[in-house]
Image (spheres, rainbow, N blue to C red):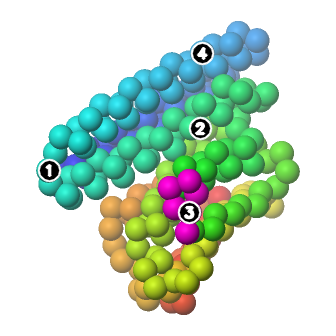
Amino acid sequence: MYMIEFTLLFEASVFSFALSYKHKVTVLSLKQNELLFKELSHRVQNNLQSIISILSLQKNRVKEIEVKEYLQETISRIRAISLMHETLQNSKQVGEVNMQEYLSALIKPYRDLNKEISFSFSCDDNLLLGIEKLTPLALIINELITNSVKHAFSNTEHPSVTLKLYSSDGYEFIYEDSGEGYGEPKESLGSLLIQNLSNSQLKGKYHIDSKEKYIFSLKF
């Protein structure tokens, strides 16, 4: 239980820290803000990488399988946010990320580690998201992919994961895997995070269809 509390507390802290940058965008001059924002993003990324290293060392020292899994899931969540800050540093728009570039970079480690799974994504050209939207969306995507890799494909001959992101009267994100589905959605830490991030952080509405295969759709 303490691992769950630690995970939620840490992610809330990271999200709050990310939002603070948005405030700086509004109070600094454009050029000063651009330089400061990228420098801050670089420092945050370095700090997140340090945290990842510490948690990785801790994971290697513990023996309990459940604790190892909690630590690995936390590491994956932090990596999703760290990647966002890395992409921000190369972005031409202050505080915004090109989602084609981000999604490509996000799924690459999963593709490299899971050769048997086909990963693909589609995204509107030049679709940009600010950190206040991308932070919760990145965590949602991480939870979805992690769940698919761990649970979805035990009896699937040609496993696949597909992500779609469109801009139309807001934004619409669709996630699909080719697993067998699992009937009624199960409550877990991951599902609670998805619910909170979708409703509270993104102010969106989501729908899950998991009867034959898993489909998650979110409008925000």
Left or right of residue 82, residue 50 in this image: left
Mark closer to the chain start, 2 or 4: 4
**Residue where numbered disc 2 is placed:** 84
Q: CA distance from mark 4 to mark 3?
A: 36 Å
Membership of 44 in magenta stretch: no
Q: CA distance from mark 2 to mark 3?
A: 24 Å
Which of pointers 3 and 1 indicates the residue nearer the eye? 3
Vertical placement of residue 40 versus 125, above or below: above
Mark closer to the chain start, 3 or 1: 1
Residue type, numbered disc 2: Met
**Residue where numbered disc 4 is placed:** 39
Residue 203 seen in render:
no
Residue at the left extreme of this rendering? 63
Mark closer to the chain start, 2 or 3: 2
Q: CA distance from mark 1 to mark 2?
A: 31 Å
Considering the numbered disc 1 on the image, is that residue within a helix, a strand or a loop?
loop
Mark closer to the chain start, 4 or 3: 4
